[in-house]
Image (tube, helix red, strand yellow):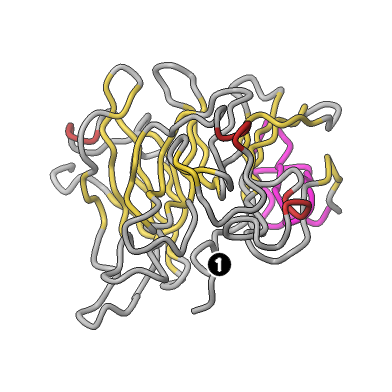
């Protein structure tokens, strides 16, 4: 497996009213949506361009604000730690805010090497993301993470990690940016490749999973032993992570440590089940309360 293949999530989509927004590799586009239709035949309408180029972290995700007026789009980096040149990272490793009506966009947060899942915390209304951090610092660095997304914040990439821990591989250094870097909220573990994120709102699962976030961990490509390859639940209290992750869906590795599946996106369906997209097993799994009738 080549470097970068740990990030193979599908394009993000967001439904707002009768418009379906799709985050493509190079643009945010939209289609008219008809829930009675079985396919889309209308051409895409371009909303705004997105940073593209080197095929490193090319997949993107999108979520709408609660009132539907804004869209938030993730854009991963073009490299591990800027080795292709910082000029190739313009507008990347970031979350963009896009005005739905005009298509005008602005950087909402930056320094996030490869943000993926996006979700609104139901109690506070704050935007959260999961991000994949840098590689090649060993088996136990750097933790992928779950974090609230603060407007205008810089999370360190590529110059530092987990706040202001300097990555000396990056040249030239930028102590001015390191001084601004903030630490994320919650470590998920090194190289777990967290891609999917959804909160438990609407879920009809056991009480232990009533308040918190489900995270799809695609799994490591360069760690021994492997990490990730499962769906975990991070408990929340008062709008913040509280306690250690709990395994929800496992068994994606066989006894030879070969991947039989790799979790990506997670979502709560209308009946309260947890849906898990598996891009190696080519399957969507549904997790329910075994005690429910």
Q: Residue at x 43, y 48 (%)?
A: 266
**In the rendered image, the vertical position of residue 86 relative to residue 74, given as above or below:** below
> Is residue 286 among what the camera can see?
yes
Q: Report the front residue among 257 and 13.
A: 257
Q: Please tell me in which quadrant of the rendered image residue 79 appears.
A: bottom right
Q: Report the front residue among 185 and 183.
A: 183
Tell me the SS state at disc 1: loop
Q: Report the front residue among 211 and 283.
A: 211
Most distant residue in the bottom direction? 256
- How many marks on residues? 1
> Is residue 14 among what the camera can see?
no
Left or right, 33 with reference to 190:
right
Q: Position of residue 46 (x, y in %)?
A: 86, 45
Q: Which residues are magenta?
A: 14-42
Q: Please tell me in which quadrant of the rendered image residue 10 appears.
A: bottom right
Q: Residue at x 21, y 45 (%)?
A: 246
**In the rendered image, the vertical position of residue 103 relative to residue 227, given as above or below:** above
**In magenta segment, residue 25:** yes
Residue carrying label 1: 4
Q: Position of residue 33 (x, y in %)?
A: 72, 42
Left or right, 149 with reference to 61:
left
Q: Position of residue 234 (x, y in %)?
A: 29, 38
Left or right, 14 with reference to 288:
right
Looking at the figure, which quarter contains the C terminus? Answer: top left
For label 1, the crowd category at 10 Å Cα-Cα, with few meaning under 14, some 14 to 19 and many 20 or more, is some
Q: Position of residue 273 (x, y in %)?
A: 33, 44
Q: Report the front residue among 191 and 240.
A: 191
Left or right, 163 with reference to 289:
right
């Amino acid at each position: 497996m080549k470097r970068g293949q740990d990030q193979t999530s599908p394009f993000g989509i967001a439904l707002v009213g009768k418009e379906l927004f799709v985050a493509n590799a190079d643009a945010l586009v939209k289609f008219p949506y008809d829930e009675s239709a079985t396919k889309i035949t209308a051409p895409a309408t371009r909303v705004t361009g997105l940073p593209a180029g080197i095929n490193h972290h090319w997949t993107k995700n999108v979520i709408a604000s609660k009132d539907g007026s804004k869209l938030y789009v993730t854009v991963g980096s073009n490299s591990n730690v800027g080795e292709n040149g910082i000029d190739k990272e313009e507008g990347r490793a970031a979350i963009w805010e896009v005005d739905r009506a005009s298509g005008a966009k602005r950087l909402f947060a930056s320094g996030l090497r490869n943000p993926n899942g996006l979700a609104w915390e139901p109690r506070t209304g704050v935007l959260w993301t999961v991000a994949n951090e840098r590689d090649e610092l060993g088996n136990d660095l750097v933790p992928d993470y779950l974090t609230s997304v603060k407007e205008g914040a810089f999370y360190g990439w590529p110059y530092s990690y987990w706040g202001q821990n300097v990555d000396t591989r990056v040249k030239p250094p930028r102590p001015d940016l390191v001084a601004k870097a903030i630490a994320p909220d919650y470590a998920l573990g090194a190289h777990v490749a967290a891609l999917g994120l959804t909160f438990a709102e609407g879920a009809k699962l056991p009480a232990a999973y009533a308040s918190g976030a489900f995270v799809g961990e695609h799994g490591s490509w360069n760690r021994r032993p492997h990490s990730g390859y499962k769906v975990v639940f991070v408990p929340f209290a008062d709008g913040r992570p509280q306690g250690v992750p709990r395994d929800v869906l496992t068994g994606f590795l066989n006894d030879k440590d070969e991947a039989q599946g790799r979790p990506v996106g997670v979502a709560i369906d209308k009946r309260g089940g947890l849906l898990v997209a598996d891009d190696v097993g080519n399957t969507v799994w549904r997790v329910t309360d075994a005690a429910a009738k």
